Amino acid sequence: IFSIAWPIMLGSLGQNLIYLVDTSFIGRIGEIELGASAIGGIYYFLLFNIGYAMNIGMQVMVARRKGEGKQATIGEVLDHQLRLIVLLGAAEFILMQYLSGGILAAIIDSKEVLEKTNTFLHYRSYGILFGLLNSCFMSFFIGIGNTRVTVWTTGVMVTMNILFLYCLVFGNWGFPAMGIGGAGLASAIAEATVTLVFILFFIVKKFRKDYHLFQFAKVKFNLIISMLNLSTPLIFQQIISVGSWWLFFISIEHLGEHSLAISNLVRSIYTFYGIPVWALASTVNAMTSNLIGQGRHADVIPLIRRVANISIGFAALFSFFINFFPALMLSVYTNDQVLILDSIPTLRTLTLAIVLF
């Protein structure tokens, strides 16, 4: 379990560190920017998770074929998924660039928050296609049980993100001070760089030959339908769960900018806890499908039970830190002492949610 899970945790850490580091930098600009990054960040997260759910469907199919020993047929699955992801990425880019402003204007009260949110999404949109491609490639590696590439991708993503945040948010090293827009652009650059790392990895290693990747033969519509049948329930799950989360932040925005800033700080910490849990969940996806492919159906429930116990262990550890060191955890994101003190009660109420999650 851990041989597959820990590189995924590292990969999840890289993706989530983008949100965490963004919040940390933006939290030192002001409350309005912090609130705007919450609404804009989850809006982006919602769009990203639609593609992520599609990639999980592909991951299940790849793991099943790997378990069945049908290695040569895995390439066509990835090739068809890449076609879908490019179409989705293009559509979501257009949505973020040209339609999001009107949607947000109808539901956000504060003109300042609306302006900052639109600025963030304008620059963040340049990374949506790269983020979806990275998720697709990562799902492929999880499906075949080879997740070590995340060591490189995570290191590159975090390094590039922090570097460009430092340059673009505050205007260091001769770069323009772009504020919240710089945070969105820094994340987009980091994701584009990771896509290049994945491509280089495919070129250098033998995955293209072993799995017959990137041949892009004639489209098989029955394969696309099978992949969408697997992923469509997951897409609706993401729309319901992340969409309701986003509507929650819209509701909080109506209470004021201070309340929205508090909610964003707490969300960032909650997201950080999700890193090991999401990694273990992805491990279950891949291992369950692989076990069924091998005909080892009886091993599935013991696997799920074991991973659930590990997840509860992470929840207990994280709940301990939340309840005994809340100010220390919040100080990572902001140096505003009033904001930190006002966030502690909300943070502590997460303990039960974390255990159930």
Image (tube, rainbow, N blue to C red):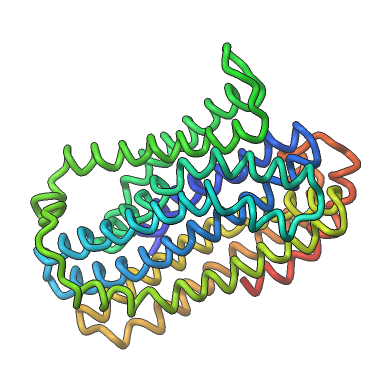
Q: Residue at position x 15%, y 54% from top?
A: 213
Quadrant of the frame with the N terminus: bottom left
Position above or below: 193 against 247: above
- x and y percentages locating residue 66 in the rendered image: 19, 68
Q: Residue at position x 47%, y 30% from top?
A: 160
Left or right for 234, reference 311: left
- x and y percentages locating residue 34 in the rendered image: 74, 43
Q: Residue at position x 74%, y 66% from top?
A: 351
- x and y percentages locating residue 21 in the rendered image: 61, 39
Position above or below: 36 against 282: above
Whether residue 272 is visible to the viewer of this picture, yes or no, is no
Nearer the observer, 63 or 309: 63
Q: How many marks?
A: 0
Nearer the observer, 288 or 179: 179
In the picture as drawn, the residue positioned furthest to the top comes out as 174
Whether residue 178 is visible to the viewer of this picture, yes or no, is yes
Q: Residue at position x 74%, y 64% from top?
A: 350
- x and y percentages locating residue 293 in the rendered image: 21, 78
